[in-house]
Image (cartoon, rainbow, N blue to C red):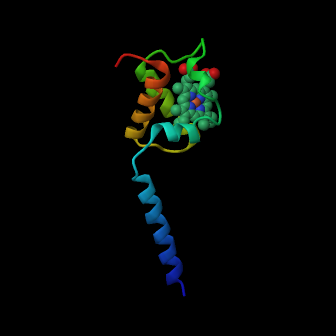
Amino acid sequence: MRLPLLFATLTLIFSTAGLAGEEFQAGKFHQQNCTGCHDSNIYTRKKRRIDSLPRLASQVRMCDANLGKKLFETEIQSLTDYLNENYYHFDK
Ligand code: HEC
């Protein structure tokens, strides 16, 4: 009787893992997850705190930690690039 349940659980785990394997889309992720506490105006406000690319990356890391998404390093990178290309424009 327990087997079907186990099977269903495994299927669920594998399909979620499959989703995580899909290509990470920074713009979409940002729109869906990063605009809850602040919107994108914070990136262009006059007194913004971030003044370099490494600091931008560490801020993204901190906000990801707040969010509890536990992004991979490559995803942090891609989010950082996304913000840099669209808002910050630091030289690489
Ligand atoms: C749990 C709430 C929360 C979430 C969710 C969140 N942030 Fe933040 N974020 C903050 C706070 C608080 C600050 C600091 C605001 C301040 O200094 O006035 C901040 C600041 C920032 C800054 C710096 C803005 C500046 O001054 O230049 C960046 C960049 C940033 N967040 C990116 C992100 C990204 C990317 C995500 C999605 C992964 C995200 N945030 C999700 C709370 C959050």
Q: Position of residue 88 (x, y in %)?
A: 47, 19
Ligand 1 visible in quadrant: top right
Q: Residue at horizontal 43%, vertical 58%?
A: 17
Q: Residue at horizontal 41%, vertical 43%?
A: 72
Q: Residue furthest right?
A: 37
Q: Position of residue 1 (x, y in %)?
A: 54, 88
Q: How many marks?
A: 0
47 vs 78, left or right, is right
> Is residue 33 shown above or below 8?
above
Q: Residue furthest top?
A: 46
> Is residue 55 shown above or below 68?
above
Q: Position of residue 52 (x, y in %)?
A: 43, 17
Q: Residue at horizontal 55%, vertical 16%?
A: 49
Q: Position of residue 90 (x, y in %)?
A: 41, 17
61 vs 23, left or right, is right
Q: Residue furthest bottom?
A: 1
Q: Residue at horizontal 62%, vertical 29%?
A: 39
Position of the C terminus, as image quadrant, is top left
